[in-house]
Amino acid sequence: MGSITVLFNKSKGVINPNIYGHFSEHIGGVFYDGLWVGEDSKVENIRGFRKALAESFAKIHPPVLRWPGGCFAETYDWRDGIGPRAQRPRRVNWWYNHDHRVESNQVGTHEFMDFCAMTGAQPYVAANMTSVTPLHIRNWIEYCNAPAGLTTLADERAANGHPEPFNVKYWGIGNENWGGGGRMNAELCAREFLRFSTVCESLPGDMTFVACGASGHDIPWTRELMGTLAGKGVTPRAVSVHYYCGTAGAPQSFTEAEWYQLLHQANYMQNIVDDHRAAMDEFDPQRRAKLFIDEWGCWHKDGSGPSKGYNLFEQQSSMRDAVVAALTLNIFNNRCDVVAMANVAQLCNNLHSLYLAAGEHFVETPNYFVYDLFKTHQGARQLELVNDCGAFGGGEAFRRAARPLPRVSVSASEAADGSVTVTLANTSMTEPIEVALTGHGGAVAGRATISTLAADDPHTCNTFEDPAAVRPVSFERDFADGDRVMLPAASVTAVRITDRKK
Ligand code: AHR
């Protein structure tokens, strides 16, 4: 048996809702026949967006959605995506040499903003820093954010159907500029960031320009980027980091060794976050620059999704991916003083997706249900914990500094209404574990809703043929401080306590 103590008097602060962010790129099947089916489609839609998906997405309260890339952003011209859809150009896009698909531009700025509005997500626009001028991006920002009637670009936005500004707060300046975004070094990237952000900052509005940070644990990149900016007296408002984990095995047929290999890789997110913050602190001890993990997730072998390889990077997601999602979100919750945004990649028909869709078919993957079970953490006060459930060693086979994988990954929070959420992931592929939940400085007691996401076989995925193979099962009971919860092998559980007894 394990035990977890919730410390009601110890907190790292409020869990930024943006930790529960998402990412949707114009790549493969994310938009076309994924999120977007078009207004004339036989598939039920809301102004062209797949209705079942939009409604399902709204239910998990997505705080923020990043778009249009990814790498796609680095050859994107925003002007291609405005105006009458029938007249928009078709373009060879960044991914063409991978899948020979042409960008139709049927989804552009107005459509994306409409999807955000219908699902409640704030837009986070990743702007091209590699192949356009700063003025070009400045004009996009002005087009999106200028008050109605103020400028010619605001009038053009109105003529295209939206007089009121979109008020986009988050603007990525470049994407992966160490790679697909121009193969820059960190110093050049910092100089380009200065060029773009300086001219864009002169526009009205409260905007956060996100500087392109490192790939994974490339701490020297972040140090050089921050150092170059600091040399010009600039602290960016946010710095991004991208981190993916993956094993050679297919998502539905991994071995037990690959189960632990992937979880150890995912657990390395702790090092990524802590070591990045430490490097940023060297130049920004007051922590004015926020850390955004604006792409993360599992990246498995291609071709395991329903399109069998047609949709670039589309993959299935099993309970293993759901446990990775829970482990990662628990890591972010427990570092809510450092992680200000995180976007799982990507929303539909791609890596670590919440949805798979094609034509009439639409399924929620196990990852979706993790976001559903965790949603009450958004905006709640994080609570520190003592986790006495043990750990698995062996992560050092992946990286020398890797920390032990917690036997039970956990985070806890208290919402403004006094309800408490404790989210737990059993990281053992084969063994269940019983865990006692006790409070210190308060009681884990009241009316509990216990929801568990599990499957008899951890390889289980939701498919078009069997869309409900993995679903959470919930029940309610009275909960007394110190009561136990049974966590099945390879599972994710949320315990939500309402009507608290002190
Ligand atoms: O998510 C797929 C790709 O992964 C993105 O375009 C890129 O930013 C990253 O390398």
Image (cartoon, rainbow, N blue to C red):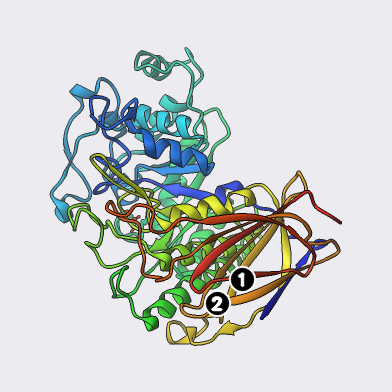
Q: Position of residue 275 (x, y in %)?
A: 56, 71
In what element is the residue under mark 2? loop
Q: Amino acid at mark 1?
A: Met
Question: In the image, is residue 138 above or below residue 160?
Answer: below
**Circle 2 residues within 10 Å: few <14, some 14–19, many ≥20:** some
Mark with earlier residue (2, 1)? 2
Along the line of sight, which residue is nearer the eye, 166 or 3? 3
Along the line of sight, which residue is nearer the eye, 169 or 332? 332
The answer to whether residue 124 of the structure is visible from this angle is no
Question: For ligand 1, which image quadrant applies?
Answer: bottom left
Residue 271 appears left or right of 479: left
In what element is the residue under mark 1? strand
Question: In the image, is residue 409 above or below residue 206?
Answer: below
Q: Position of residue 227 (x, y in %)?
A: 54, 62
Q: Are circles 2 and 1 on residues that touch, CB within 8 Å?
A: yes
> What residue sits right under mark 2 in the picture?
432
> What residue sits right under mark 1 in the picture?
486
